[in-house]
């Protein structure tokens, strides 16, 4: 199936093929139906419609098959090329706030971040026509997709296959394989413990809550405390070229305060709770049923598990039992008392009728 992948790719001419997605989820048609077909039996117009994992061996076999079918063996031999070049030396230069990477065959692509960048912003790539790419997010397997705009947090490893299509002006028949990677984190993050500078950059300065911190190393910085970080990296090849990132490190879980301190024996009557942060989400299990708190007062007797979670994903849980307590002026108590009085009155009347004078 993959054998026909590159064959069809080279026959598409000027079509651009994209293989990474913003959502990192399977592609769907306009009718929201997942695509599932064999390339040998279907006539389709966009190679990005294919979904599924692609292995290294499959790509290697596809390349060999392509070379044989296109009769490129003699071309490769005559031009002294190897057919496939892994991670060639790239000419890197900044262009209008982006980074341009140029291959030995003259092809180039643009990225909003340098290779190896850790950022809390979206990442965009601009690739030349005829590019094939695969994306691996969080080591979940390489997949084809349909966009070069990335927004979801995760560790991204991209494999880009770039070539010049056969023709009179073609001078380089190599297939260049570029490995490109970056990491997207949340604006408010609780996972990052060490910041690493991107490739060919060094850490210029680090600020936490606006205060300049002492340097630790050119390539790394240990994030020791929570706070708002601003990190600037400078390009080694040229002064004044920077890659900046900023985010809030938050590893402290929020907490709940209660109007009455819960104890092992539980609490009686209604109890109020108050989150320590305004944007927290409070969920609960009540007698085994899961739900979310719509207010901050617990009134029904039973067993509760309250969990409070902040925007960064930090979570804390509480367990308490609310005992059933009856109010003396509760209408149920009054009704029960009236029923008892009526029964007692009826009993007295019956007893008086049955009394005998001795």
Image (tube, rainbow, N blue to C red):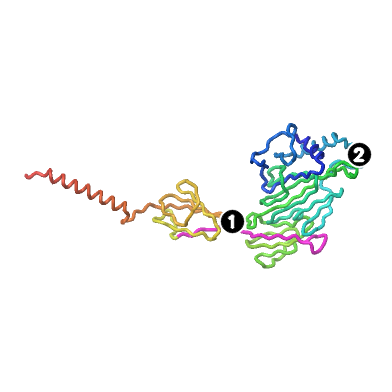
Nearer to me, 46 or 254? 46
Q: Quadrant of residue 39?
A: top right
Q: Is residue 203 above or below residue 48?
A: below
Q: How far across and down, in percent of the image, does residue 211 sit?
A: 67, 68
Which residue bears the numbered disc 2? 77
- Which type of secondary structure does the marked residue at label 2 adopt? helix
x, y (%) of residue 134?
Answer: 74, 44
Q: Residue at x 32, y 54 (%)?
A: 330
68 is higher (above) or lower (below) than 147: above
Mark 2 vs 1: CB contact within 8 A: no
Residue lying at the far bottom of the rendered structure: 211
Please report the residue visible at 72 percent of the width from the left and 39 percent of the height from the top. Answer: 50
Q: The C terminus is located in which quarter?
A: top left
Distance, label 2 to label 1, CA atoms, is: 58 Å
The residue at the point 78 percent across, 53 percent down is 110
Q: Earlier in the sequence, mark 2 or mark 1?
A: 2
Q: Residue at x 43, y 52 (%)?
A: 321
x then y, percent, for residue 200: 79, 57
Outermost residue, top direction?
41
Per the rendered image, the range of residues in magenta is: 234-258
Quadrant for the N terminus, please: top right
Reply yes or no: does residue 255 show up in magenta: yes
Q: Which mark is residue 311?
A: 1
Numbered badge on residue 156: none
Q: Relative to 156, is 224 above or below? A: below
Q: In the drawing, does residue 66 fall left or right of residue 226? A: right
């Amino acid at each position: 199936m993959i054998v026909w992948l590159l064959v069809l790719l080279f026959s598409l001419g000027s079509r651009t093929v994209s293989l990474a997605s913003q959502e990192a989820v399977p592609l769907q048609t306009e009718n929201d139906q997942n695509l599932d077909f064999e390339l040998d039996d279907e006539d389709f117009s966009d190679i990005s419609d294919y979904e599924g994992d692609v292995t290294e061996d499959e790509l290697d076999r596809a390349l060999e098959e392509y070379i044989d079918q296109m009769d490129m063996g003699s071309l490769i031999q005559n031009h002294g090329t190897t057919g496939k070049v892994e991670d060639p030396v790239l000419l890197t230069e900044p262009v209008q706030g982006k980074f341009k990477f140029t291959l030995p065959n003259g092809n180039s692509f643009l990225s909003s971040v340098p290779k190896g960048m850790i950022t809390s912003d979206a990442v965009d790539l601009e690739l030349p026509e005829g590019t094939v790419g695969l994306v691996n997010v969080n080591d979940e397997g390489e997949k084809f997709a349909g966009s070069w705009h990335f927004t979801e947090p995760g560790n991204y490893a991209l494999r880009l296959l770039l070539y010049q299509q056969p023709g009179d002006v073609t001078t380089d028949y190599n297939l260049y394989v570029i490995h490109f990677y970056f990491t997207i984190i949340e604006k408010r993050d609780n996972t990052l413990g060490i910041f690493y500078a991107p490739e060919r950059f060094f850490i210029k300065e680090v600020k936490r809550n606006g205060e300049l911190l002492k340097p630790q190393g050119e390539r790394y910085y240990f994030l020791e405390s929570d706070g708002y970080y601003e990190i600037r990296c400078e390009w080694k090849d040229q002064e004044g070229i920077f890659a900046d990132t900023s985010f809030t490190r938050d590893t402290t879980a929020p907490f709940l305060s209660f109007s009455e301190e819960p104890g092992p024996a539980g609490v009686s009557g209604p109890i109020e709770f108050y989150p320590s942060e305004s944007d927290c989400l409070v969920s609960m299990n009540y007698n085994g049923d899961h739900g979310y708190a719509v207010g901050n007062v617990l009134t029904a007797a039973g067993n509760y598990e309250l969990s409070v979670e902040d925007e960064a994903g930090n979570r804390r849980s509480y367990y308490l039992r609310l005992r059933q307590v009856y109010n003396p002026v509760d209408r149920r108590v009054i009704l029960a008392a009236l029923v008892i009085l009526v029964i007692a009155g009826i009993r007295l009347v019956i007893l008086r009728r049955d009394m005998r004078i001795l």
